[in-house]
């Protein structure tokens, strides 16, 4: 259903769960009393055509570099026949209710129907308004370039028709979205609508924002995770120039100053005594040992079968978005106003209200674009902390977590341990078992600032068999799965692709080893055992495009892996130079993805390229060590994320043609890229990698 909102301009709204619409017209017959009023759009996607001929859709999702604003603008422009440059996609503030969750690769999936129906409804009303103005049959008019065009060449901009279109209740033409065969913009590679603003510095991030009176703020934090403040001597810090306030907060001691330079100087002048955190006696070796012991035992294999067994360890990993966490807070006696980038603004508002003792209705959360996230901005630790500092300091603050703050005290992907057994007989796999254990966040560490710590995606990963009842990605006979875990006082968070990046990576390594045990080529083996035609198609595509099986020099090799999730599938072929096994270099990556309708193939290609770098990083070199309760790494100098010199010299992405509904894509490529890189390394070195990243 698409509804009217009472306004002087054409303003229509669709529920975000909208999946059907009337066959003719924009809505059923309605009386004036049940036209929705402005402000009743908490669970709606709202489109307005302004008098200035701008198409404005306030997006209840956050832009963190994934290109969702461009994708939505393309959907709107397509159905309205508007110029893409005339579409504005500002981000919505936190609402009182409704779905503002950005994650699980579901943004395009959830918005594709509502956005197109909104725009199609608006187009039908604008055409009807023009027909009435010109006394012409509506069917004789067409739309283009944000205008309605008459057969005799007369034109009227959408903006000039907006007021009259707002009064129309029954349209004279269909309000149905176009069939895919008529798409001119959707499916065409398109440059991001914010690209120029990003490269010229015009794009506004939280750190760029100037809020009256908000002073730069940093926090002194304990050396260990969960360390507790015992005492602080702040006399030297307060005596420094530019210092406005020093306040205690649950995470440490905050300094509010005239500039970040002054704030860091004063922070370093604090004399603090800390009590060690609850993990002070633990380091990596003990954590790995406990995880290994927590993995459930595998059952007995089928009688007469041959076994392929493997165990894998995955380290903790930081999200490390390029833009560090920043939040501006202005907390008064009866109200609070917060500015930051959030994937969960509604939850953030409620938690900020609870932390500050205010009703949720008194808290306003403004959502800003984020410079990367990868799941980190599902959590809102920095925003809660900023609110508490503002309340204690009695003034607005602009809080910045340094890179070291977020690496050592922020959210991280949990470490896991996996145990596999594949049983084969007569040339086929007859049973496949997987047991795992992961680190969970202990209840003692789940305070107000740590809400929504580990958000799993809403969909289910299609795996070989980690969940009983799944049919599995492969024809692997009897499937079994079990899971255990340990709880530690470590701040955890959903990292891009959540558990799939570990589960699928390990499984795809095992698939290669099964193929080797059977004396079969890894690609040929997958072709004969994969269940899905779509997965086979993307595998065939990368094998052909990447010249699978070509002769390579010693120390060089290819690897492949596949993945299916979010209603989409992907395959990756990676080539590696491991002539120096301690410093391998991925030289080529070829990926193919079937995501249904790809709204913006150029954006999807960028997403796949990013997932390839994620796979290279987490398989070869990037992870976090725990040393006596402290995170060893503190910056990109030692958290060794892939840089330009580690990126593949050649990258190509192939988007499979499809007229189906869009599937998820943002996280899709990580498991396939990770598995392909690991398999390439194993083939190049003749080893069987078991701990990731490899340099741990």
Image (cartoon, grey):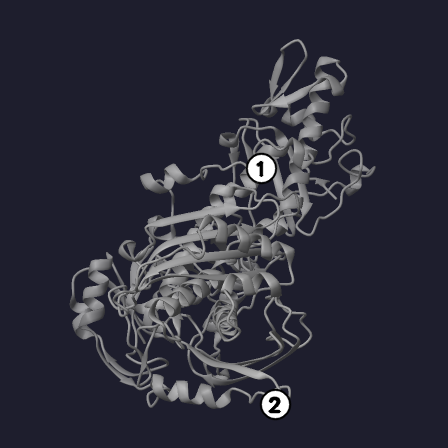
Label ID, residue 630: none
569 horizontally vs 258: left or right: right
In this view, the residue in front, 614 or 162, is 614
Q: Quadrant of residue 21?
A: top right
Q: List the residue tagged with mark 2.
A: 300
Q: Where residue 114 sits in the image (x, y, percent)?
A: 66, 44
Q: Quadrant of residue 407?
A: bottom left
Figure disc tally: 2
Can residue 101 be seen here?
Answer: yes
For residue 638, above or below residue 104? below
Q: Element at badge 2?
A: loop
> Which residue is drawn at the image coordinates 64% and 59% (left, top)?
532
Q: Quadrant of the C terminus?
A: bottom left
Q: Quadrant of the N terminus?
A: top right
402 horizontally vs 678: left or right: left
User: Do the residues under discs 2 and 1 have CB atoms within 8 angstroms?
Assistant: no
Q: Where residue 459 sits in the image (x, y, percent)?
A: 62, 63
> Which residue is drawn at the image coordinates 28% and 79% (left, top)?
223
Q: Where residue 180 sits in the image (x, y, percent)?
A: 66, 36
Give the Cα separation between the discs numbered 2 and 1: 52 Å
Can residue 328 be seen here?
Answer: no
Q: List the residue tagged with mark 1.
A: 186
């Amino acid at each position: 259903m698409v509804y009217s909102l009472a306004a002087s301009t054409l303003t229509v709204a669709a529920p975000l769960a909208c999946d059907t619409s009337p066959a003719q017209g924009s809505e059923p017959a309605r009386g004036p009393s049940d036209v929705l009023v402005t402000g009743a759009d908490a669970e709606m996607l709202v489109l307005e055509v302004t008098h200035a001929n701008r198409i404005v859709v306030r997006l209840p999702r956050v832009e963190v570099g994934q290109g969702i604003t461009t994708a939505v603008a393309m959907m709107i422009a397509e159905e309205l026949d508007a110029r893409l440059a005339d579409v504005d996609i500002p981000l919505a503030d936190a609402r009182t209710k409704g779905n503002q969750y950005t994650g699980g690769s579901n943004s395009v999936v959830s918005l594709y129907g509502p956005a197109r129906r909104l725009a199609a409804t608006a187009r039908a009303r604008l055409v009807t308004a023009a027909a009435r103005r010109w006394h012409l049959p509506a069917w004789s008019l067409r739309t283009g370039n944000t205008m309605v065009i008459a057969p005799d060449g007369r034109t009227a901009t959408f903006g000039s028709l907006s007021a009259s279109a707002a009064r129309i209740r029954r349209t004279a033409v269909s309000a149905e979205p176009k069939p895919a065969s008529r798409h001119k913009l959707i499916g065409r590679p398109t440059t991001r609508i914010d690209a120029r603003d990003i490269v010229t510095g015009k794009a506004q991030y939280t750190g760029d924002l100037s809020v009256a009176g908000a002073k730069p703020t940093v926090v002194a934090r304990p050396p260990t995770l969960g360390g507790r403040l015992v005492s602080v001597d702040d006399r030297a810090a307060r005596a420094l120039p530019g210092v406005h306030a020093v306040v205690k907060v649950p995470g440490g001691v905050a300094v509010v100053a005239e500039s970040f330079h002054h704030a860091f100087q004063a922070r370093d002048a604090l004399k603090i005594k800390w009590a060690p955190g609850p993990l002070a006696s633990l380091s990596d070796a003990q954590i790995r040992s406990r995880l290994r012991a927590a993995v459930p035992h595998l059952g007995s294999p089928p009688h007469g079968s041959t076994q392929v067994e493997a165990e894998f360890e995955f380290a903790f990993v930081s999200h490390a978005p390029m833009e560090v966490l920043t939040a501006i807070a202005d907390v008064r006696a009866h109200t609070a106003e917060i500015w930051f980038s959030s994937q969960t603004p509604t939850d953030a508002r409620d938690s900020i209200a609870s932390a500050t003792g205010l009703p949720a209705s008194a808290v306003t959360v403004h959502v800003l674009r984020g410079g990367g996230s990868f799941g980190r901005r599902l959590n809102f630790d920095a925003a809660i902390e900023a609110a508490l500092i503002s309340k204690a300091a009695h003034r607005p603050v602009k809080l910045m977590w340094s890179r070291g703050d977020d690496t050592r005290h922020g959210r991280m992907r949990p470490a896991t341990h996996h145990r596999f057994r594949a049983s084969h007989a007569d040339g086929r796999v007859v049973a496949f078992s997987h047991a795992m254990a992961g680190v969970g966040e202990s209840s003692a560490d789940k305070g107000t600032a740590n809400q929504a710590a580990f958000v799993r995606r809403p969909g289910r990963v299609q795996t070989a068999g980690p969940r009983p009842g799944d049919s599995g990605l492969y024809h692997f006979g009897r499937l079994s799965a079990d899971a255990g875990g340990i709880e530690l006082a470590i701040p955890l968070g959903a990292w891009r692709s959540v558990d799939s990046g570990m589960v699928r990576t390990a499984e795809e390594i095992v698939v290669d080893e099964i193929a080797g045990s059977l004396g079969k080529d890894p690609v040929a083996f997958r072709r004969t055992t994969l269940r899905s035609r779509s997965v086979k198609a993307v595998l065939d595509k990368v094998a052909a495009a990447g010249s699978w099986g070509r002769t390579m020099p010693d120390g060089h090799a290819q690897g492949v892996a596949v993945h299916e999730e979010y209603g989409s599938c992907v395959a990756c072929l990676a080539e590696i130079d491991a002539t120096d096994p301690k410093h391998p270099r991925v030289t080529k990556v070829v990926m193919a993805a079937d995501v249904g309708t790809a709204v913006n193939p150029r954006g999807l290609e960028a997403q796949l390229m990013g997932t390839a770098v994620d796979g290279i990083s987490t398989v070869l070199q990037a992870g976090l060590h725990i040393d006596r309760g402290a995170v060893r790494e503190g910056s990109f100098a030692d958290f060794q994320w892939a840089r330009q010199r580690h990126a593949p010299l050649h990258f190509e992405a192939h988007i499979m043609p499809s007229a189906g509904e869009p599937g998820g894509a943002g996280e899709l490529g990580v498991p396939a890229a990770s598995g392909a890189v690991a398999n390439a390394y194993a083939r190049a070195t003749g080893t069987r990698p078991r701990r990731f990243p490899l340099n741990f």
